[in-house]
Amino acid sequence: MPRYRRSRIEVIRDILKEARKGANKTRIMYRSSLNFACFTRYFEELIKKGLIVEVEPNPNGVKIYKTSEKGLRLLEVLEKAEELI
């Protein structure tokens, strides 16, 4: 299968989608298929804009992040736009 470079919007969509149910940074990073540097840059921006929020840590003390309501609205718009293309 040929590989292609994802757009910024596609990367943001993938991160928001993976964080929808809540996960730690590592899981979101791997499931979004990003390296650490790229993931960190996008992730910090999404947190600053309120699209991803930190929720209660799991019993092991690992921080869990989840797509916020604002992020879910954006994800819905991005998925609808993708359907139209």
Image: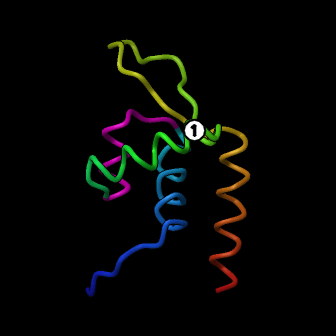
- Residue at 33% x, 42% y is 27
Residue 47 occupies which quadrant of the picture?
top right
Q: Is residue 58 above or below residue 36?
A: above
Which quadrant is the N terminus positioned in? bottom left
Residue 66 occupies which quadrant of the picture?
top right
Which quadrant is the C terminus positioned in? bottom right
Q: Position of residue 67 (x, y in %)?
A: 59, 41
Residue 3 located within the stretch drawn in magenta: no
Q: Position of residue 74 (x, y in %)?
A: 69, 55
- Residue at 27% x, 87% y is 2
The part of the chain drawn in magenta is: 22-33
Horizontal side, residue 3 vs residue 19: left or right: left
Q: Which residue is mark 1?
A: 52
Horizontal side, residue 28 vs residue 2: left or right: right
**Helix or strand or loop: what does disc 1 sit on?**
strand
Mark 1 surroundings within 10 Å by alpha-carbon count, few (fewer than 14), some (14 through 19), many (20 or more): many
Residue 27 located within the stretch drawn in magenta: yes
Camera-side residue of 6 and 67 = 6
Horizontal side, residue 25 vs residue 49: left or right: left
Colour mapping used in the image = rainbow
Q: Is residue 16 above or below residue 53?
A: below
- Residue at 41% x, 47% y is 41
The amino acid pointed to by label 1 is: Ile
Q: How many marks?
A: 1
Residue 59 occupies which quadrant of the picture?
top left
Q: Position of residue 63 (x, y in %)?
A: 41, 22
- Residue at 49% x, 32% y is 65
